[in-house]
Amino acid sequence: MMSPKGSLICINLFLWTGILLFGAEDPLKVLILHSYQTDYPWTGAIQRRIETVLSEGSSINVIIKTEHLDTKRLWTEARKTLFVRYLEEQYKAYKFDAVIVSDNDAYNFMIQYGDTLFGQIPWVFCGVNDPDLTVLNQYRSRVTGVIEYVNYEKTLHLIQSLLPDLQTLFVLADETTTGILNKAEFKSQMAAMGQPVPYEILAPASFQEILNQVCRLPEHTAILLLAYSQDSNGTYIPYKKVVRSVSAAASVPVFGVWDFNMGQGILGGAITSGFEQGKQAAGMLIRILEGTEPQNIPLLHLKDTPLMIDWQQLQRWSIPKNRLPNGTVILNKAPNIIAENPHIGIIIVFLSFIIVILGVFIILLKRAQSTLRASQIKLKQELQEKEMLLREVHHRVKNNLQIVASLLHLQQSYTTNPETQSVLLDTENRIRSMELVHEESYEQESFEKVDLVQYLCSLGSYLSSISSNEFTCTFECSGHENCESIYVPLEWVIPFGLLMNELITNSIKYAHGEQELCGIYGYIERIDEHVVRLTYWDSGPGIPKEYSFDKPETLGFQLMNVLAQQCNVRLLRDEKNLSKIYILITIDQITKAGNI
């Protein structure tokens, strides 16, 4: 005879063998059908809660599919027909075990098309306002759900408690299915209460017109924001934008009745929760999947909605806290840490002592900073005075050089000898090139360095402008995009300017030939981090090959060679283009006198 322990082992082996042979139980298939898209916060809350309960609240293996009618965006009979065809095609080979629907549009859709699309399967609804019980009772054997109850009476009592001088309540709702039902329920409850407060339902208008109205509401009024996501033009407005925009624009407090309104700018209300409805609906579905008949699960009316208030909005409208009804849940209020944990008080006292000590040190530090600041101001004033003196020196040097150049120019008019005139003109141009250095330094407010590209443009423009009237001379100088601001020391640019004066003057004399136009060009580019190259050329025939910078034979070449050595640059010729000269500037050799 087998022992009880042996029998238990055999039973377990039999069960595991059955699982291995026939597989585990197939998962149950559930469809969640929403009236609206998930960008509507209410729908998102219901979806998340249903998924959480189905995945964590039961051992039943469930596969969830989700569809959205999206009825807040121009829902028409034609779109409804297309959606029916979509569901037929999408799930023609997919059999659902149960369906959950949220809000009235999905509920009505299921009443109309559910049996045709999915067969006579059980389904649960939530978020449905004022369903027709006569119709519902026809499906009651396989349908149950959560009937949404918006507690306007409780919300109105809260408004009257917070605003005892209330004269008119303005109600804002749209013309969607939910908006129309909200307005009907509100009117019904107000009538049952004997209309304790005058109210006015804002007429349909564009959203901008609505905002213009709410910003001009008179004193001692309030706004009750119900379902609003589509204006009179049929334009869909995201609900968060509606709540935030209306609350920000309103001249009076705004109240609401749904949890997703809280924290968006409304003051408060008797709050209906999408999370709670999703939780209850999912719980009902689990009971059905476990074997309970839907007709044995009572319909749930969630009338006990809690009063909630936003503390920040209470402060915004300067409403005393003692007006809050007992049991009101306060949101967005900073917690009283000391009352919750007395040890924090000791720490705060200790930190306060440290802060006092730090305050003393800060005062001493500020005094020291004040003394230092006074010294800095004095040094700055002295520096400004020196800069003014230095600026005046540059200005006077420029003026003196200008006077000398003007005298040479004047002397030319009294000289008839062409050679003498040429010498005087060359000398005047050299002096002008030095004058431009001081002028650039003065205008750039820099006394140590000069922008090389700008200096060459000024020098070339001046020399070309005083060229012979018998022909036109132009000068163009440009820099590579990485070299547009090459700054060179003041001491260095003077001999370099004299060197460029010789080159440009030589081009003006000989580059035009028989042409009426003489073009002179310069292009500056950085070869590497150590070398900058100035490519210089003109429109003339160029310097003959027999002339060389290494063995200068003419006075002009000798002068250019001396100036090149003085400013540490190399002069190279282009053997293929005799009119082109390369001037290599080694940065390291000129940075001792300033910075590039």
Image (cartoon, rainbow, N blue to C red):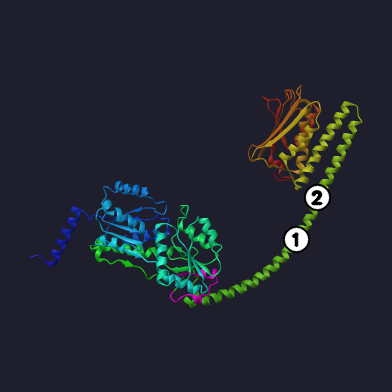
- Residue 373 is drawn in which quadrant? bottom right
**Could you tell me residue 425's position as x and y percent?**
84, 32
Which of the two residues, 439 or 486, is positioned nearer the viewer here? 439
- Comparing 449 with 325, the one in front is 325
Q: Where is residue 51 drawn, in percent x and y?
A: 34, 59
At 35% from the left edge and 53% from the top edge, which residue is drawn? Answer: 67
Q: Which residue is mark 2?
A: 390
Q: Which residues are magenta?
A: 307-327
Total label count?
Answer: 2
Which residue is pictured at 62% across the width and 74% down the height?
Answer: 357
Residue 68 place in picture, x, y as percent: 37, 53
| Quarter containing the N terminus | bottom left
| Residue type, label 1 | Ile
320 versus 411 height, above or below: below
SS for tag 2?
Answer: helix
- Estimate how packed mark 1 is, as few (under 14), some (14 to 19) or many (20 or more) residues with alpha carbons within 10 Å: few
* Residue 39: in magenta span: no
Give the vertical position of 424 relative to 391 (above or below).
above
- Classify 404 as above or below 285: above
Q: Which residue is mark 1?
A: 377
Of residues 492 and 147, which is closer to you in this image?
A: 147
Ranked by sequence position, the earlier of labels 1 and 2 is 1
Badge 2 amino acid: Leu
Q: Does dot 1 land on a helix, a strand or a loop?
A: helix
Query: Which residue ends up furthest to the right in the rendered image?
Result: 414
Give the spatial CA distance, label 1 vs label 2.
Answer: 20 Å
Q: Is residue 408 left or right of residue 443?
A: right
**319 part of magenta stretch:** yes
Q: Position of residue 582 (x, y in %)?
A: 69, 32
Question: Are there few (<14), some (14-19), or many (20+) residues within 10 Å of tag 2?
Answer: some
